[in-house]
């Protein structure tokens, strides 16, 4: 197959293609289990294989994909024809940032392959979790396990050849309950990434059991709680919501394709402009954010992106000032040309596709916020006069240019005079992105920092679901509207 | 091709019977084409041909499934998939209820919604449509974005319970055209949903864009004061809200699990405005309907709300099995949702703009990134996008910066509902997550709801 792919790439080059690449997935397999109130509602597996071909011709992209590899020549011709038509409407001819020719292999670290664990053992884990969640106050208990494993062979017309084998294991728990007025509330446990690997070894029964008890306790506290007041006060975001705040109002607005208007028909744009780089005070001086695709244990680390660029750790926001973006080879060239200055020195290696039948686009890697100097969570609470501690994503809605947001959280605890006083239910907060990040007044130390994962980030047309991570500390923001 | 699919499914069924398995098979084939525009260029031109087979194996009250992307020539791989599913079912855990195995009483083939001219529309024709719609509207600063998504979709199913099968084939197209200002960041949009090639109407798309562009290029934008507004929603916003209503109001399984703002006591009670009627109607071809569900149940017009009275919950088969309810034929990739039109003769943007008005009216055609804040109370939040207008009481029109609305669906479709336009039209709600699933909801052209609170107002686009 590899030789056939290389021959086809050469053939299209001879027809006038300026660049061709291919992602061959010999296999991608998944295994999902979902237990709901003790019923194994879903026990499913899947497998797929195929090839995606991307062709650049006269400054325009064409793409074609198929699982049927019986006529690979026709597949390459379709991609070429798609590019040929696209070349009839070009306003800024696509060109690609320079890169080195790479021959390499990447395998995500794991100790125990989840696909080698018997189904009965996985079910036993879910049964044990379900038993621990089956407590007074809980009306719905949901436990799930999801595993993926794929081999990707990337070959391009510039001589690169990269093999990747990526395995992911996701497990989470959720409980729901009804308050005295019939209002439904939820509490989830999505474990932060610990250790250096991402296999079955992370499905730690004791750790999950402790957290199962915690979320049941916190759910019951919420069920008994008063309604969250409408108020302006400091919000202290725990990693379980801080990750989503980072994802939606730093990660997405800093995707360079969004900044350049490539998502305006669907996902939206960004309030960030090319003029803003090295100038915009995105947040307070306490805010330093990176796109770090080198964290070993996170799904936002993948060795090489689907342009064949090595994983990197790049600054996005340096002490509050915007300095970088989430980029691929095409967008950095266009951005530099449109800005008439060099903002980006090459691709940051963030162009990824969710499967062989989707085209690579700028995706978040691990968008992480540096830990700070403001102590532990307890220290931050102690130094807060009027605030609310918030955790757990319940709802999220963001403006089309990522300029404003509204989040609902699973749990909230009011803080008065440096102490937690009582839990509240239906906690929400909202704000304008830049004003909010500039109200950052406390950043927790390393003890508060966790790597949270996102397994369902959607973007693009045709739509693509991507996995990634966020390393975030506890943070406090002042004067935020809550309770609406 | 349909014969080949049914033959293959029949052969796989025979294999399962020989092995003594109890299985059902669900086949999905898509031939998808997408031309995407950005910055006035074609940013992506792609096609995918994919065949998916999902095998569900049953052993008593145990159930497991195995899905694969395959092609019809790979019969041995598909048989292997059946073996894997069966092996998984053996080791699965018994459910606490008896699960239903699909049983087809007769063979049902429906290709009446397939138009080969639409599914194979050429790249050149797609480009020509876009060029026609936006000719002369683009400038150095006003750029074209959008998609022309089209394709063919075939689903088929069979089980070991009977030799009959179902097969349904549909063609579809979704056109979205956006013009946006690359410096000011405003966006206007026109959309169309097509089931046949003749449904495509570039003149209508152009008229919609031209009307919005006139205001966005000539009027001074304003930040709206926070407060209560009378709001006219357009088709996209109405469809989005109806979709959420389907999810957190009318789904019987979710109601039993506490995720609905309705309960069984609400049945036959007036819950909404008496102007509001809402159906699942598989006779409406614009909805890309399924006339059988995947368990073989014949699908008929199903009233969810009639004149404000809540009529019934929709029951998916598995939920019906679990909660001891009668399934209602709703186990399909999407429902055929239709909201009834009203009596207001306001059937175009021009007519809306010329409507005599006693108060200011905020027109919101599209709600971006809606989400559920509180399912028990039906509260949603989302922001305006794509061509909002403030129609002033004095007859003038102002372009507002985007605003956020956080409101209960019980208010929006309840007593605050002021009027509904006469005209109804299909609004395409297709998403391309996973397998192709062309979907549209039939909605009124406009709907006015009074006294809704704007909780956030942008100071720029």
Image (spheres, coloured by chain):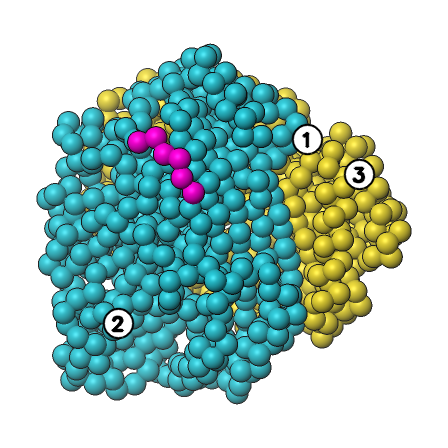
Q: Which residue is mark 3?
A: B8
Q: Is residue B93 left or right of residue B48?
A: right
Find residue A380 and report its image quarter.
bottom left
In the image, residue A260 above or below residue B382? above
User: Helix, strand or loop at disc 3?
Assistant: helix
Q: Which of the two discs, 2 and 1, sits closer to the camera? A: 2
Mark 3 → mark 2, Cα distance in angstroms = 56 Å
Q: What mark, if any, has residue A448 been given in the picture? A: 2
First-in-chain label (1 vs 3): 3
Q: Which of the two discs, 1 and 3, sits closer to the camera? A: 3
Between residue A339 and residue B192, name the one nearer to us. A339
Q: What mark, if any, has residue B458 been given in the picture? A: none
At horizontal 53% and vertical 51% (from top left) the residue drawn is: A149
Res B110 seen here:
no
* Chain painted cyan: A
At horizontal 69% and vertical 36% (from top left) the residue drawn is: B71
Q: What mark, if any, has residue B114 been given in the picture? A: 1
Mark 2 → mark 1, Cα distance in angstroms = 57 Å
Q: Which of the two discs, 3 and 2, sits closer to the camera? A: 2
Chain name for mark 2: A
The magenta span reads A100-105
At horizontal 57% and vertical 74% (from top left) the residue drawn is: A125
Callout 3: 10 Å neighbours few (<14), some, many (20+)? some
User: Helix, strand or loop at disc 1?
Assistant: loop
Tell me what hue chain B is rendered in: yellow
């Amino acid at each position: 197959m590899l030789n056939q792919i290389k021959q086809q790439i050469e053939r299209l080059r001879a027809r006038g293609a300026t660049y061709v690449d291919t992602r061959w997935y010999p296999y991608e397999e998944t295994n999902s289990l979902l237990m709901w109130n003790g019923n194994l509602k879903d026990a499913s597996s899947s497998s797929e294989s195929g090839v995606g071909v991307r062709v650049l011709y006269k400054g325009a992209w064409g793409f074609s994909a198929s699982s049927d590899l019986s006529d690979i020549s026709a597949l390459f011709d379709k991609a070429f024809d798609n590019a040929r038509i696209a070349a009839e409407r070009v306003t800024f001819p696509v060109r690609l940032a320079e890169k080195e020719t790479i021959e390499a292999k990447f395998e995500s670290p794991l100790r125990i392959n989840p696909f080698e664990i018997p189904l009965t053992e996985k079910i036993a884990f879910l049964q044990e979790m379900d038993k621990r969640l089956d407590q007074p106050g809980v009306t719905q208990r949901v436990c799930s396990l999801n595993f993926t494993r794929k081999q990707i062979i990337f070959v391009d017309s510039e001589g690169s050849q990269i093999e990747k084998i990526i395995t992911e294991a996701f497990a989470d728990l959720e409980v729901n309950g009804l308050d005295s007025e019939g209002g439904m509330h939820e509490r989830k446990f999505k474990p932060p990434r610990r250790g250096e690997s991402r296999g079955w070894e992370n499905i730690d029964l004791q750790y999950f059991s402790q957290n199962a008890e915690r979320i049941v306790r916190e759910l019951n506290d919420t069920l008994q709680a008063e309604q969250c007041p409408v108020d302006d006060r400091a919000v202290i975001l725990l990693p379980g919501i801080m990750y989503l705040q980072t994802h939606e109002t730093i990660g997405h607005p800093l995707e360079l394709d969004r900044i350049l208007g490539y998502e305006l028909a669907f996902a939206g744009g960004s309030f960030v402009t090319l003029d803003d780089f090295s100038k915009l005070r995105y947040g307070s001086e306490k805010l330093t954010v990176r796109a770090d695709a080198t964290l070993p244990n996170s799904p936002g680390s993948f060795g090489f992106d689907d342009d064949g660029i090595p994983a990197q750790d790049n600054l996005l926001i340096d002490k509050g000032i915007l300095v970088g973006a989430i980029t691929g080879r095409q967008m950095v060239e266009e951005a530099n040309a449109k800005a008439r200055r060099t903002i980006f020195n090459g691709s940051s290696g963030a162009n990824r596709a969710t499967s062989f039948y989707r085209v690579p686009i700028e995706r978040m890697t691990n968008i992480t916020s540096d830990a700070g100097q403001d102590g532990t969570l307890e220290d931050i609470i102690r130094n807060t006069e009027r605030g609310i501690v918030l955790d757990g994503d319940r709802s999220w809605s963001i403006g089309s240019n990522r300029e404003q947001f509204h989040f609902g959280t699973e749990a909230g605890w009011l803080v008065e005079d440096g102490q937690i006083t009582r839990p509240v239910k239906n906690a929400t907060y909202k704000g304008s992105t830049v004003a909010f990040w500039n109200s950052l007044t406390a950043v927790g130390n390393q003890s508060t920092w966790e790597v949270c994962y996102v397994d369902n980030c959607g973007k693009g047309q045709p739509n693509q679901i991507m996995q990634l991570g966020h390393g975030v500390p506890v943070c406090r923001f002042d004067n935020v509207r809550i309770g609406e | 091709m349909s014969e080949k699919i049914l033959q293959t499914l029949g052969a796989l069924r025979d294999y399962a019977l020989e092995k003594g398995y109890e299985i059902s098979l669900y086949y999905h084939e898509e031939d998808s084409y997408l031309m995407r525009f950005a910055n006035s260029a074609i940013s992506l031109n792609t096609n995918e041909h994919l065949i998916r087979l999902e095998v569900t194996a049953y052993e008593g009250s145990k159930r497991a499934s195995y899905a694969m992307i395959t092609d019809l020539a790979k019969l041995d791989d598909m048989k292997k998939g059946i073996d894997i599913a069966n092996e998984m079912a053996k080791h699965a855990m018994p459910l606490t209820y008896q699960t239903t195995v699909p049983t087809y009483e007769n063979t049902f083939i429906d290709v009446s919604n397939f138009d080969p001219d639409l599914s194979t529309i050429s790249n050149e024709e797609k480009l020509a449509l876009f060029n026609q719609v936006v000719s002369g509207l683009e400038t150095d600063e006003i750029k074209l974005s959008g998609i022309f998504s089209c394709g063919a979709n075939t689903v088929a199913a069979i089980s070991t319970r009977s030799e009959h099968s179902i097969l349904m084939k549909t063609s579809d197209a979704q056109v979205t055209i956006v013009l946006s200002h690359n410096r000011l960041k405003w966006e206007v949009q026109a959309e169309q949903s097509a089931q046949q090639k003749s449904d495509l109407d570039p003149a209508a798309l152009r008229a919609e864009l031209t009307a919005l562009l006139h205001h966005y290029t000539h009027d001074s934008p304003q930040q709206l004061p926070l407060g209560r507004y009378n709001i006219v929603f357009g088709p996209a916003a109405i469809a989005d809200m109806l979709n959420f209503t389907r999810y957190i109001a009318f789904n019987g399984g979710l109601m039993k699990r506490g995720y609905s703002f309705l309960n069984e006591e609400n049945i036959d009670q007036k819950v909404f405005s008496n102007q509001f009627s809402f159906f699942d109607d598989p006779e409406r071809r614009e909805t890309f309907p399924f006339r059988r569900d995947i368990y073989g149940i014949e699908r008929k017009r199903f009233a969810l709300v009639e004149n404000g009275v809540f009529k019934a919950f929709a029951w998916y088969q598995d939920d019906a099995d679990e909660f001891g309810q009668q399934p209602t034929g709703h186990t399909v990739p999407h429902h055929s949702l239709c909201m009834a039109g009203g009596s207001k003769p306001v059937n175009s943007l021009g007519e809306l703009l010329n409507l005599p008005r006693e108060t200011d009216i905020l027109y919101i055609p599209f709600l971006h990134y809606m989400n559920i804040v509180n399912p028990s109370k039906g509260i949603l939040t989302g922001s305006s996008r794509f061509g909002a207008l403030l129609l002033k009481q004095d007859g003038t029109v102002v372009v507002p910066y985007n605003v956020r609305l956080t409101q209960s669906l019980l208010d929006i479709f309840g007593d605050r509902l002021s009027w509904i336009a006469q005209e109804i039209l299909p609004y395409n709600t297709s998403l391309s997550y996973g397998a192709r699933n062309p979907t549209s909801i039939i909605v009124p052209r406009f709907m006015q709801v009074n006294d809704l609170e704007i909780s956030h107002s942008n100071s720029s686009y």
